[in-house]
Image (tube, grey):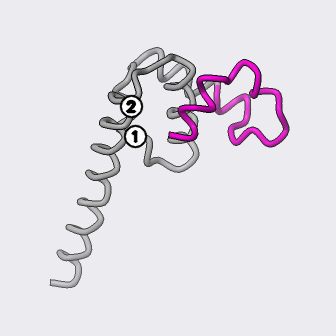
Amino acid sequence: VVNWILGRGIDTLRTRRWFPVSPERYEQASRTFRRFGEWTLLFAWLPFAGDAFTIAAGAARVNLGVFVALVAVGKAARYAAVIAGGLWAFA
């Protein structure tokens, strides 16, 4: 949710040195976000790209409830796969 909030104020924060996403990665995530829309938030768990997706969602003014629901579903699916893989490996 912090990245979503940062995305809401991206125009004023993007040039700051401490900004968590590089300009190239942000542009790539923005293109992907424009192409696939809110569904990209299901992949917010991905390293590097996930942060850029969540910031792009804030910049695109995605509804906070939709944002939280999609990110939660994506992360829950990831952890379910990790747990299932662990159970299968040690069974």
Q: Callout 1: few (<14), some (14-19), or many (20+) C-alpha neighbours within 10 Å? A: many
Any magenta on residue 31? no
Labels 1 & 2 near each other (Cβ < 8 A): no
The magenta span reads: 1-26
- Residue 14 x %, y %: 75, 27
Q: Secondary structure at mark 1?
A: helix
* Nearest to the observer: residue 89 or residue 5: 5
- Sequence-earlier tag: 1 or 2: 1
Any magenta on residue 7? yes
Amino acid type, mark 1: Phe
Q: Callout 2: few (<14), some (14-19), or many (20+) C-alpha neighbours within 10 Å? A: many
Q: Quadrant of the C terminus?
A: bottom left
Q: Residue furthest bottom?
A: 90
Reply above or below: 23 against 2. Answer: above
Residue 43 appears left or right of 29: left
* Residue pointed to by mark 1: 43
Q: Which mark is residue 67?
A: 2
* Nearest to the observer: residue 26 or residue 13: 13
Instruction: Give me the residue at 73% from left, 29% from top.
Output: 23
Instruction: Give me the residue at 44% from left, 41% from top.
Output: 44
Amino acid type, mark 2: Phe
Q: Residue furthest right?
A: 17
- Residue 54 x %, y %: 51, 34
* Nearest to the observer: residue 69 or residue 31: 69
- Residue 1 x %, y %: 50, 40
